[in-house]
Image (cartoon, rainbow, N blue to C red):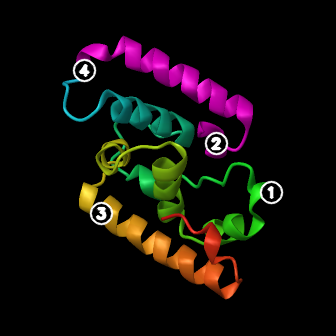
Amino acid sequence: MLTSLPGNRDAARDAVQEAFAVALARRGQYRGEGSLEGWVWKIALRLASGMRPSSSAPLADRLDPVLPEQELDPALAAAIRALPPRRRLLLFLRYFADLSYEEIAQACGLSPGTVGAALSQARAELGRALERNGQLEGVIR
């Protein structure tokens, strides 16, 4: 799933491998707050974006994923591409990486409420875009 973030498969593979190496090396820093999966995703997303661990910039504002297998539903892919990058990333993490709102919040440095609101807005925007194109059955609910 990370292949849609850094732009190519090799960079994504490197980011995933490095994320697991970093997580293993820093396992003593995991305090058990939140999920382990969310913690590892946060490391992987930072690596994929080229951010330093000390950066305070929100991850959700720095990453811009693309829909995997866009050819399967071009209308949906176009509607997702029209979303702002933050909403695209949160949609990607929810529906393609299958993370919970809490795990997304942990990985992106947001509150679960912000994640929920952004996903609600994204789904509404997708619904409107697909409805305009007569493709409403492709909406993510």
Figure check: 63 above or below 130: above
Instruction: State the residue at coordinates (32%, 49%).
Output: 105
Residue under circle 1?
71
Q: Nearer the viewer, mark 3 or mark 1?
A: 1
- First-in-chain label (4 vs 1): 4
Residue linked to disc 4:
29
- On screen, residue 19 above or below 100: above
- Residue reaching furthest right? 71
Seen at 73% across and 70% down, the residue is: 75
Amino acid type, residue under disc 1 in the picture? Glu
Q: Earlier in the sequence, mark 2 or mark 3?
A: 2
First in residue order: circle 3 vs circle 4: 4
The residue segment tinted magenta is 1-29
Q: Residue at x 65, y 27 (%)?
A: 13
Residue position for label 2: 6
- Kind of residue sitting beneath label 2: Pro
Number of the label disc, if any, that sits on residue 114: 3
Name the residue type under label 3: Thr
Q: Amino acid at mark 4?
A: Gln
